[in-house]
Amino acid sequence: MASTDNPVRITEICQVTPSFDSPESATEFSLPLTFFDNFWIKFHPVERIFFYELTDSTPAFFNSVILPKLKQSLSLSLLHFLPLAGKLTWPPHAAKPFIHYAPHNAVSLTVAESDADFHRLSVRILEAVESHPYIPELPVYDSTAETISIQITLFPSQGF
């Protein structure tokens, strides 16, 4: 039976904005959802977990070398996918929801650390309850929701 103890320690929660080196990131816009988006919006969001083995990943090395590069890469990538930094919005007067992007919108990034067995988690099919600690919360409010949230969990000397 799976343990219900939370094996994850949150070390940082930050907001990553698209790189502001481009005029596109300074432009506010709205993006309507497609027919297929409207169909799937009623369901729970998709949750994906990717594992990257890195056996020499001490917390100090990870936090000083890898994590800043991941944040910078995310910021640069968001510049090309601005709707991901936006918010899913459904105002009371609107017939359908849409994605609204405004300058300085950001993606929530949770950084965590875990002493769990990386190899067991990454090679076996798990019960859903075992993977929940590695999935970030997706903030949802009355009329808005984040479009994406990301969690990076370090497994020291194993991977992330």
Image (tube, grey):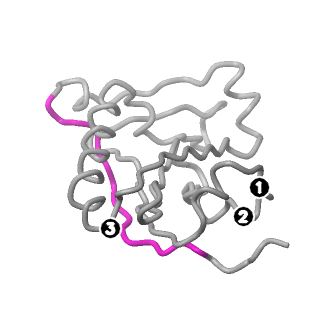
Residue drawn at x 39%, y 35% as measured from the top left:
101
Residue stretch rendered in magenta on the structure:
7-21
Q: Which residue is mark 3?
A: 59
Asked whether the residues under the numbered discs 1 and 2 touch, taking CB atoms below 8 Å apart as contact, a structural biologist would say: yes
Which residue is denoted by mark 2 in the rendering?
Answer: 130
Where residue 21 sits: x, y (%)?
14, 31
Quadrant, the N terminus: bottom right
Residue pushed farthest left?
21
Q: Residue at x 29, y 53 (%)?
A: 67
| Residue type beneath disc 3 | Pro
Residue drawn at (25%, 61%) of the image: 61
Element class at badge 2: helix
Q: Is residue 37 magenta?
A: no
**Mark pair 3, 2: CA separation:** 23 Å
Say whether residue 15 is left or right of residue 9. left
Amino acid residing under circle 2: Glu
3 versus 130 height, above or below: below
Q: Position of residue 104 (x, y in %)?
A: 27, 45
Whichever of labels 3 and 2 marks the residue nearer the N terminus, that label is: 3
Q: Marks 1 and 2, how far apart in space?
A: 6 Å
Crowd rating for badge 3 (residues with CA inside 10 Å; few <14, some 14–19, many 20+)? some
Looking at the picture, tell me which residue is in the foreground, 8 or 74: 8
Asked if the residue under mark 1 is in contact with the one under mark 3, i.e. CB atoms within 8 Å, the reply is: no
| Mark 1 crowd level (few <14, some 14–19, many ≥20, 10 Å Cα) | few
Q: Identify the mark nearer the N-term, 3 or 1.
A: 3
Q: Which residue is mark 1?
A: 126
Q: Residue at left 77%, top 50%?
A: 125
Residue 27's spot in the image, x, y percent?
A: 26, 28
Image quadrant in which you'd find residue 82: top left
- Name the side, left or right, on which 45 lies relative to 52: right
Q: Quadrant of residue 110?
A: bottom left
For the residues carrying marks 3 and 2, which lies nearer the camera in this image?
Answer: 3
